[in-house]
Image (cartoon, rainbow, N blue to C red):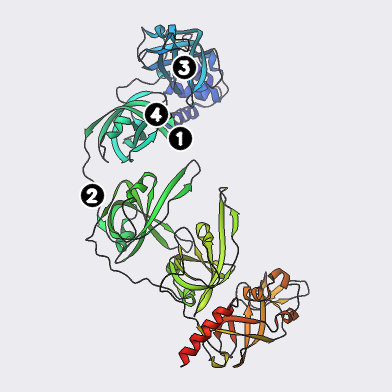
Amino acid sequence: MNTDRLVKEILKKIPKEELERRIEKKIKESGGLISREAAISIIASELNIDINDYVDEEEFNFSIMDISEGQSNVEVTGKIVDISDIREFRKRDGSLGKVRNITIADNTGAIRLTLWNDKVELVEDLEVGDVVRIENAYVRKWKDRIELSSGINFTIEKLEKYREENYPEIKEIYSVRELMPDMRVRVKGKVITVYEKKEFKRKDGTSGKVKAFILRDDTGIVRCTLWDDLSEVELNTDDVVEVKGYVRKGLRGLDIQVDSIEILKKGETIESPIVDTSQLPNYIGEIISIRGRILRIFPTRTVKFDDRERKVQDVILMDKYGKVRVSFWGGNIQKLKNVKEGDTVLIKHCKVKSYLTPEGEEFITLSAQSYSEVVKDDTVEVPDFPEKLIKIGDIKYLDEKFKRDVTTVGRVIDIQDIREFKREDGSTGKVRNIVIEDETGKIRVVLWDENATIDIKEGDIVKIINGYIRENRGVMELNVGRYGKVIVNPENVVVDIKRKFIGDLEIGDSAEIRGTVVGYIKQDLILYLCPHCNRRTTLNEEGRYICDKCGEVEPREVPVGALILDDGTGNILCRLYGSVVEKVLNTSREELKNMEVVVFERILGEEYVFSGTVNNRSEFIVRGVLSFNIDKEIELLKKIKDSMM
């Protein structure tokens, strides 16, 4: 190509300073792979200058990057970067055929050319480094990549005259930055990550083995893959190696399919400081080792990214200063196969990571590396901390950091149906709400996915482990997600809600009572409360709800009721709110909005079991309502009678 004439034409359109700036930018964007002359050609094309007028006769203007599937009669010029030996194969008619591959490259890319039968002889006098003209080739797709193939009228000719800057330099050793797909190369660098060897079954039923590692030099990193016998080579982080192989384009970038590997220098043994959980904030981004007891091993789960899916398994590790989550991704999951909950271990070589919670608080986790080890260690001294059960009434007083890890016990007083929903990634999730209570209060529990399908019945005692608190429209909820656990009716666990006669109730009592509805108080059936301060709102003439403190609001609609319950020893005014009203009347909130308070007439004379607390006005504030079961009532009455004797 006559570059001088091309430059003169470009300068008719842009100033010389602008041309120099663009040339420097093009070379920098390519990582230094293209020459000044190639950059000038690209700039000319962008300025709609027909560079065909400036091409020397010997070279085609058609670049390797322009080759696409389905083309025929392809004419292209390239430098030979690899030539294979001739291989024979048996054709379908029983005769012998021959095949040979060469790879050519220019500054835009590389491509493999397959020569068949008599065409293999056309490259007998050619060698790596020769620049050739190819005519009448056709493009085919083979194993998800396009390549050239020799047709009937195919020709290949060595060029004696060409511009060297249009083609890559043939090197003994390539840098990572210089790699292009379909090249056969030798690369030297340091091993920074080694993945575990995997075994697999081929389509023909035979077994295969594969192991991958990440290689780094001064210009970048590249994945290298070792197959079968090569996968047995012992590699460690920081080993210096030289690999020879074929470069292909994988899902995550370039990948060298290694033909041979030589370890030039063994890396030093990796050592990382052993720290405890209290020291982790001082090691963000660094590699450490940690000792402790495995409290929880969570099920393996799949995480979807934009371009792939990966499996991960988490554990919770505890030492005498606290707890931390350790994540094992992909092949690292195998490191957990010989440990169980309760084991004391040393986990070597974890990366310390941190992120901020929505409240702005730092949260620290650990991530196992490919060279991490999980070693059982009976010498680890971890105290047997008694499990800290939080009373339901105390949850609202927890500091924010403790609201991420709540363990509590309660009796189920309400259960809703399982609902399915669609996540943003298209997958289906499940969710179910239950309400639990103890003697201090009640709380709604949100069960997600697998936890939503656990068999739970009204009256069951449930233990929630590793739940987390969220607010939903101003209401505090206890969520049980992938790190949480639900145990139904755990052994030796009771919820101490005492059954009392109404006549024995005192102010401040938290108890369970049973009685007959003998009356109700006439009042509004729905309260419209401010979602911010929980005060009553008023409806103005324009149909808007106004809070005296917060102004115009969209109110919370809360069903309310006031029933008089009598058990023969006395009677008491019982105040009911929200879902308790819906359950007693067996009527939804939407339906109640269109009803009057006389709807309570339907339950006069009915018997109920209420749990709740006596306030300072001697009213019973109902937390929950349980279904009436005559057999349980007889058993309870016997226990009450025995306790009084």
Q: Nearer the viewer, residue 78 or 516?
A: 516
Q: Amino acid at mark 3?
A: Thr
Residue 428 horizontal/vertical position (percent): 57, 51
Q: Amino acid at mark 1?
A: Leu
Q: Amino acid at mark 4?
A: Gly
Residue for badge 2: 271
| Label 1–label 4 contact, CB within 8 A | no
- The image shows a total of numbered marks equal to 4
Local packing at callout 1 (Cα closer than 10 Å; few below 14, some 14-19, many 20+) is few
Q: Mark 1 or mark 4: name the one nearer the start of the chain.
A: 4
Mark 4 or 3, which is nearer the eye? 4
Label 2, label 3: how far apart the Cα atoms are: 56 Å
Residue for badge 4: 32
Q: Is residue 160 visible?
A: no
Q: Residue at x 52, y 27 (%)?
A: 15
Residue for badge 1: 251
Q: Residue at x 48, y 29 (%)?
A: 22
Label 1, label 4: how far apart the Cα atoms are: 24 Å
